[in-house]
Amino acid sequence: MVLNYIWIAFFLIAFVIALVKMVFMGDYEVFPAMMDSTFSSSKTAFEISLGLTGVLALWLGIMKIGERGGVVNVLARLLSPVFVKLFPEIPKGHPVTGSIFMNIAANMLGLDNAATPLGLKAMEQMQELNKKKDTATNAMIMFLVLNTSGLTIIPVSILVYRAQMGAAQPTDVFIPILLATFFSTLAGIIVTSLYQRINLFNRTLLLTLGGACAVIAAIIWGFSQLEGEMMNRVSTNVANILLMTIIVGFIVAGMRKKVNVYDAFIEGAKDGFDTAIRIIPYLVAILVGIGVFRASGAMDMLISGIQWGVEATGMNSDFVGALPTALMKPLSGGGARGMMVDAMTTYGADSFVGRLSCIFQGSTDTTFYILAVYFGSVGIRYTRHAVACGLLADLAGIIAAIAICYMFFG
């Protein structure tokens, strides 16, 4: 329901702004630009779905081998003590906990292509437990918020973009991104737990969250000891080695269980193809709405208004130049990436704005894209508090990114 209102708002706000610009400012190009955006966004949505088809087929095929080989069930048993607390609706030891873990692990390593199909698999398994098929469950919402908060340990793509844009030290944003994304995820868990009345003050969750904080601190310390080039090399290799280890490990587990791994893969891959087809309408809807909103100039007006408000209060407004990346990130990953590159091109890769735009890009994930794809894949229409929790996690990530950037580079 919330997505419905937001989608309508995109079009109505864009139409009113475009009408004002044409009548009072003589801008006769705004409506053609908006219509061009609808066609290009529709094409982009289909291309994204088409690009996902092969990846979905691959990873859902691998997951099917893991299920038949018993790996997913082993992960489910190991994670049950924590997941029972965060996802009380999911039965203890249910295979979906293994899928959730695999998705979160892929996100943490910056492996977006692997994370999406694993996440869609988890959503399908949670939908099997859902008694109201058109309404999001608490477990689904917690899972979505963990995804939209964007916890990433190795932001390889951002470091590559900084190197391409001529940054003197491309990896200087690594630790700030790690800190910002951690705060975003922590805020997402807390907010969603408050909505769902989950008690975080129990031994299991306190030990888990405390352990996560310790691991993050250790990773930060370890990478801070490396030179920039070595940091890039280690992070890239670790991510890819782990990914290949998962694939080979699942196949070996299937062989030990005497599973026909080829047939299992084909069965899972067929599910991946069907899923890719199902998400096309949802992607078209959300990307067209975002495209029209941008083409009307509404985003530029919003940024200008924020800058005026900040300067009116006498606060430092250096961060405002990077806000387009932050505001676009919940709407479109590609759009936010373009804003990040534009900020580095305009202000310089090593400028405050250039660095902050990179931290924004790495601190959260594409909330509305994830909601559209994940909920759309299982036919969820009523998202309940998912949007509110996801956006509050995004806000926490934005605030943390600004504070951390001033701390490191201000």
Image: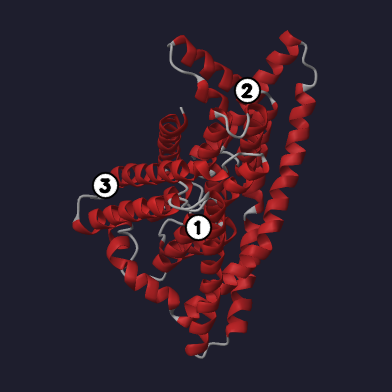
Mark 2, residue position: 300
Q: Report helix, strand or loop for mark 1.
A: loop
Residue 318 in percent (x, y) is at: 51, 22
- Examine the rendering and report whether any part of residue 262 can be seen: yes
Q: Which of 382 and 402 is in front in this view?
A: 402
What is the crowding at mark 2: few (fewer than 14 residues within 10 Å), some, or many (at least 20)? few
Q: How far apart are marks 3 and 1 (CA)?
A: 30 Å
The tag earlier along the polypeptide, 2 or 3, is 3
Q: Which amino acid does label 3 sit on?
A: Arg
Circle 3 residue? 197
**Residue under the image location 54 percent in, 55 percent down:** 230
- Marks 1/2: CA distance? 33 Å
Q: Quadrant of residue 286?
A: top right
Q: How far apart are marks 2 and 3 (CA)?
A: 39 Å
Q: Name the residue under label 1.
A: 109
Residue 280 position (above or below residue 23): below
The disc, 3 or 1, on the residue closer to the chain's N-terminal end is 1
Q: Position of residue 146 (x, y in %)?
A: 42, 51
Residues 229 and 292: in front is: 229
Three-letter residue code for mark 2:
Asp
User: Label 2's element?
Assistant: helix
Disc nearer the start of the sequence (1/2): 1
Of marks 2 and 3, the one in the foreground: 2
Amino acid beneath label 1: Leu
